[in-house]
Image: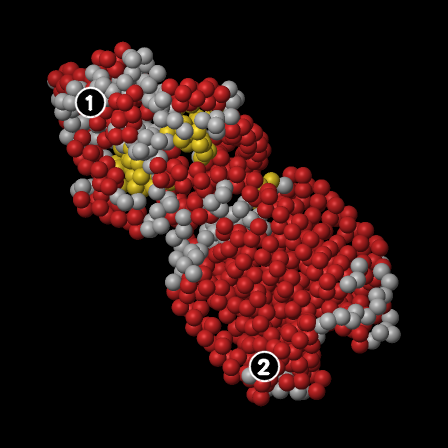
Amino acid sequence: MKQTVISVYERLVLKHPLTTLSLLLVLIASVGFFAKDFHLDASADSLMLEHDKDLRYFRQINALYGTSDFLIISYTPKRELLAPETIADIRKLRERLLEVERVTQVLSILDAPLIDSPRVTLAELSREIRTVETPGMDMESALIEFTTGSIYKDLLVSADGRTTALQVMLATNEELQSLHRQRTELREKRDDGVISAAEEQQLDEVSTAYDRVSRAHNDQEARDIAIIRAIMAEHRDAAELFLGGIPMIVVDMIDFIRNDLVKFGVGVLVFLVSMLMLIFRRTQWVLLPMACCFCTVLFMFGFLGLIGWKVTVVSSNFTSLLLIITLSLCVHLMVRYNELLAEQPDTNHAELIRETIRTKALPSIFTALTTIAAFASLLTSDIRPIIDFGWMMAIGIGFALIISLILFPAGLVLLKKPQPFVPRFDVTRYMTRGCAHLVEYHGRSTLFAFALITLVSIYGIAQLTVENRFIDYFKPTTEIYQGMALIDRQLGGTTPLDVVVDADPEFFTAREQEAAFADDDPFGDDFFAADTVEAGISGSSYWFNSYQVNNIHAIHDYLDQLPESGKVLSMSTTFTLMQHVNEGQPLDNMALSVIHRKLPEVIDNSLFRPYMATDGNQIRFNLRIIDSDPNLRRNELLGKIERDLVELFDLKPEQVKLTGMFVLYNNVLQSLFASQIMTIGVVFLVIVGMFLVQFRSLRLALIAIVPNLISAAAVLGLMGLMKIPLDIMTITIAAITIGIAVDDTIHYVHRFNDELRVDGNPRGAVRRTHDSVGRAMYYTSITIITGFSILALSNFNPTIYFGLFTGLAMLVAMFANLTLLALLLLMWQPRQQSI
């Protein structure tokens, strides 16, 4: 079977290279055509956990209380906030924003109802809503209400009265929301295992339609935000402005991903060409590997467009990774060919290529498979972008292997035989022989050094955390960072957390019993009818009545005093306003009902519907958490709130539910530890299993994995020592490091086996292996390390950490493979002279 495969390969690739290349290029062009459908995704959904029960509840609450897209513009005027010139400029800004097609409303200090400047009665409020634009308004009183009032302080105006916010409401894309709702419902059915065949087909159709509408919506949103930024620029002479909000973050993140793809791709390409020219100094040794890299990347872009996979911020570096891994495969082939050419300068060109493939095909296949296994281990994560990244890289590396073993040798056959390569100054030789010298004459010191690295790494790993701040994902020079920092400091926090409190379950039981009694009482309905009509919802709900007002105030005050809490809005805020318009008198059920009915609709929409269910049996406390707080511990905070609400306010555990982006983001962070352990465990087991298949020795398989585990542990330990937390990017470093670094291990052990069979001298085999495959290991490692360092050009800090720490891990892996691996092989040889 093996001979048949080799025979077919040689006949197709080496004897008919033009035909083979033509067929391969047709395939690449056919798939690459779909690169036009390649798209990016930076939506909040792209960073959620798979099958997260909290996500379902989050969507239910959003559907119940309503949600819409909006942007926040922070406005810090150069004059006084309520100066006539400032008011005029804000008015002009509002009018210009309303000219944008998708902007439906702009809420600002110009629209805010003032009830305490001076205090108004219910009758006055019903007749007229007073604002700063009302003639005769006392601006000093208005500023006091803005900066001290429970509604506006740290929400609309900063406590120092210097900064205000404009909320730019965007039109809801009804078609997109409908498709999203349908897709969510069908996906939940699929996850629960109750979906029918017809619904499966419907899910495919809805998903396709959703992707199409979503792309159009994102394009429109990007245009709208560009227009809004241009409008803001017109007002920078009068104030300092920053733009915030989820739509802006999504648009900027897509720009980051797009820029990273270009920067990484071009940067790595330029670097790789430079490295190849510097190392090999022959045109064919640049053109062939670059052709392999280009074809691999083009195929993957087309493949992703064909099947509709979107690239997220996590997978935005897949281009540079594919370029690096493809080149690594080619470099081992180039180095081997040049070795044979130097040893046998008179041998036929075709025979040299055949021998190169014969000796390098199997190690190349195993190195590609181990790297695929490393990326496939990411499929065990619960985070969708990490799962997709694993799939993308596994498929891409598979095709990179095929390209390298077809395009490279077939292209080389068509080129004339090169002259033997003689380096002018062989620094690689000094480095590899230096490592061999350490192995041969300083074995104990080398072992001690790596043992020390291991112990320090274990200590550092124990210090690792997952507690990171979303704001720190961005450089301080970006508008995302600047806007979030200002809103966090002066406008009540950025990350929303909803505390939802249901009615006591016993309330519903009692009400059912009362209803049953009323049905049996012939006079019951008539007797209570008048009171029920007068009391309205306050007479039938659990929360909206005079008995619960103080309890709601108490819960609100508790949440407000939390150090991590910025602005809190709830029915407590509403009750405070109601008591103001009730001339400061306590609120009984009758007053609650009357005021509720007589309040203007704009106030009802702002202060009732977002914080209480229509039946009054569920209330919602909306907190904004200060995400930039360095002492923020999300998981501890959520646990504390749940415990305290039960213990301090006599609530039942089933009454209290926490939701919002704060909860969903915390779930992602808390899953990182489990994902890290799972991915490392899976990649370890798979690679050891592959080593067993290849080397047919458990001891040798365990020896081979040690240097790679140490390199991964060293980087994780360093992150722990430097207090750098795990995030959605750095979680992949360990598995990727092991998967890529193990390539050099396989090439080294494979060549060591061959050299050992020559004379049975282990030390001589180590020296010859360092002089041969050690060179390729050095070239590929330096290429990979420098290639990963290019990721430091990103605007996304997790990508920068990913690039720098993965590059460092590869540096440790290179020295570990050239010293520790060789040393362990020598230590094993006295017990067994052949492998």
Q: Amino acid at mark 1?
A: His
Residue 729 position (above or below residue 590): below
Q: Position of residue 161 (x, y in %)?
A: 32, 30
* Quadrant into which the C terminus falls: bottom right
Residue 751 is marked as: none
Which image quarter: residue 817? Answer: bottom right
Residue 439 is marked as: 2
Q: In the image, what residue occupies the spot 15% across and 18% down? A: 531
SS label for mark 2: helix
Residue 715 position (above or below residue 818): above
Question: Which one is nearer the viewer's eye here, 735 or 455?
Answer: 455
Q: Amino acid at mark 2?
A: Val
Q: Earlier in the sequence, mark 2 or mark 1?
A: 2
Mark 2 surroundings within 10 Å by alpha-carbon count, few (fewer than 14), some (14 through 19), many (20 or more): many
The residue furthest front is 79
Q: In the image, what residue occupies the spot 56% across and 40% down? A: 255
Q: In the image, what residue occupies the spot 58% across and 77% down? A: 819
Between the residue at mark 2 and the residue at mark 1, the CA separation in whole angstroms equals 83 Å
Q: Would you say 829 lies left or right of 139 here?
A: right
- The residue at which mark 1 appears reads as 580
Mark 1 surroundings within 10 Å by alpha-carbon count, few (fewer than 14), some (14 through 19), many (20 or more): some
The answer to whether residue 422 shows anywhere in this view is yes
Q: Position of residue 470 (x, y in %)?
A: 43, 46
Which image quarter: residue 167? Answer: top left
* Quadrant into which the N terminus falls: bottom right
Q: Position of residue 138 (x, y in %)?
A: 27, 18
Question: Which one is nearer the viewer's eye here, 775 or 400?
Answer: 775
Q: Position of residue 646 (x, y in %)?
A: 21, 44
